[in-house]
Amino acid sequence: MKEYSTKDIRNVVLLGATKSGKTSLAESMLFEGKVITRRGTVEDKNTVSDNDELEKLNQRSIYATPLYAEFMDKKINFIDAPGADDFIGGAVAAFKVCENGVLVINAQQGVEVGTRGMLRYADIYKIPLIIAVNQLDAEKADWDIVQNSLKETLGSKMINIQFPTSTGAGFDGFVDVLMMKYYHFKDENGTREDLEIPAQFADKAEELRQELIEKAAEFDDSLMEKFFEAGTLTEDEIRSGLAKGIAAREVYPVFCTSAKKEIGVKRLLEFIKNVAAAPDCDETKPASLFIYKNDMEQHLGEVSYFKVMSGTVTAGVDFEDAASGNKERFSAIYAVAGQKKEPVNSLKAGDLGCVVKLKNGKTDITLSAPGSGIVYDKIVYPAAKYRAAIKAKVQQDDQKLGDALKKISSQDPTVIVEYSKELRQTIISCNGEQHINVVKWRLNNEFGLEIELFAPKVPYRETITKVACAQYRHKKQSGGAGQFGEVHLLVCPAEGELNTKFKIDGKDTQLNVKTQDITDLEWGGKLEFYNCVVGGAIDLGFMPAILKGIKERMVEGPLTGSYARDIRVFVYDGKMHPVDSKEIAFIIAGRNAFKEAFRNAGPKILEPIYNVEILTPAEYQGAVMSDIQNRRGMLGDMGSDKGFAVLKARVPLAELYRYSTTLSSITSGSATFTMEFADYQPVPGDVQAKLLAEYAAADQEEE
């Protein structure tokens, strides 16, 4: 392979809903780029992209696959990203290293929920898009449906570069209004004839070309001036104007393709070569690269996929991770087309490649020339939407399970694994049930582990709703020095302005604060601690011990063992012994006085509430709303987004386990959602009673 300079490189991510045909399009792009001599098919399980065993079993993309084509003296790197929202991490990682995107649309469906999802992600990550309408040869292909859905979604930003002369089984060509030619395809290997536009399509072609010229002129004042003067623009001028509009994400050019018949793929590649943005990288700066993907391959071991961010990366050169100080040596580097790895001597800024068996080459790190200190921002992934508790079926496999999950998470950072001390469970968070099933399959088949997945406990919180007092004396005598400490305290909710006047033992009492300690708790909320002791009843030196005892009790709240929060504590009296009073005595006294006061202060269980936003076809809106209400959800704003209903709701986390599965079921897989923690709110009375009963029963079982 020749060495390509930055200006001759194009990086493209292939996006689209499931079954839009991205993998077939990738196969045709490889064929056009002479990387392969024969195109495989998803059905035959022999494509370059979907080469993983699990992808072959499911006949769908699960992982993002880096590929390339050498085309007309340019190197076009492209990443075939998964279409399902469950595996969005692959697309997001590709956004980090690609300057352009091709959004593939199924000609039988038009813009789907999955398409809308990809458009939203492209907007968030600022990825310019070219649109490829694929499967125009399918029996139910409908150009009008596609056009209407694109116009509804993109408005005037969409612009047709091409239109088909027919669709369905007879699809064998299209009119290109940029080139003003009719491209006819004689066979299923992309054999193309460049012909004059048939008379019956001439008027439509002229009309669309005029729209194309006007759109191109919008983004360049000099082109607009020429257009007003001459009434037209040259092909190169149109390309120049479109390039600016596409880069600004104000233009979405539309192309016609049938990846399976090799129709339109070469023209798409030509447009990418001529119009898509080259990497914004500098070959003259010190060498640096960013690792965006990590994988384990059977015959190679660990493979780290990277983009050269600056300079030139050469085999045999040392790099360092400026963030950690780790050193790495690249013994060899490769250009990548799926499992095909071609050794190369060097890769210039903007290019994509891979290296094997780095010591610390994990996903999301920067490696750069020693001493350069270069560090790039990490990838920001969408929040997980599916949580489950996980454990090995055989307890002796716990360590093996932990090691396996660590490896899986290093390869897929959207698999988040953590042990919750609060819940005493290992929690795995993913993007959906399909995603977590992939993890389960890998644990079973790659690591030989049998595991169980079940609903995680909910991280409830405990608080109080009214004022209560309590006192506790700790006295212990066991020969020699004893232990003595007595604490009188008052608790109330930590809300509103500080009030120090209370009724204690039936008397109105004004407390005078001597010292205070306000703690923002690591699990949320706060603890306000006020020392109001007068007359030396408790020495000031014992106050930290009392506070420590209270904090210990708040780690395991009196109601359900959940963390307690948002409480004010006033220590107003007590007793001590000149010999027997010790720190441990006041820790115990403070802990038990707090526990008793808490139980008498209108204790309340709080539950985590999440903001949920659902994007669904309008025909399923009623079913989705009904399901949310059945989950104790509170519906909020409702609206529409280019043909789809948008529902917002506040839903308890306890009711969201496996929600992605239910939503898919009631909408035939056509809806998607996001969820984000909002706040804690009191649970209803019947729910609190149930939780208290469950906790009491669990306590009895442990005894």
Image (cartoon, rainbow, N blue to C red):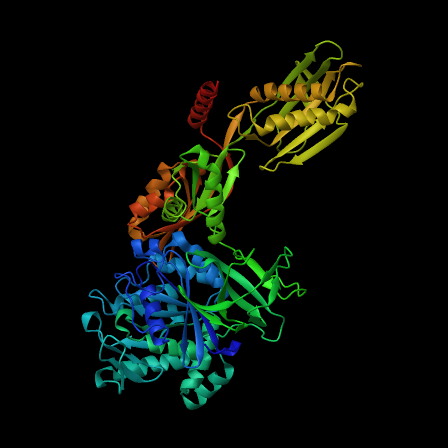
Q: Residue furthest bottom?
A: 230
At 25% across and 78% down in the image, what residue appears? 173
Asked which quadrant contains residue 628, the reply is: top left
Residue in front for this viewpoint, 15 or 653: 15
Q: Quadrant of residue 514?
A: top right
Q: Position of residue 64 (x, y in %)?
A: 41, 60
Q: Where is 524 relative to 320, above or below?
A: above
| Residue at 62% from the left image edge and 57% from the top image edge | 326
Q: Nearer the viewer, residue 43 or 139?
A: 43
Q: Is residue 168 left or right of residue 596?
A: left
Q: Quadrant of the N terminus?
A: bottom left
Whether residue 271 is visible = yes
Residue 176 spot, x, y in % from top left = 32, 80
Numbered label tally: 0
Q: Nearer the viewer, residue 372 or 276?
A: 372
Asked if residue 275 shows in the view, the reply is no
User: Position of 609 compared to 626: left or right?
Assistant: right
Locate residue 211: give its quadrant. bottom left
Question: Residue 344, position in %: x, y?
Answer: 49, 72
- Residue 411 vs residue 486: left or right? left
Residue 11 image position (x, y, % from top left)? 46, 70
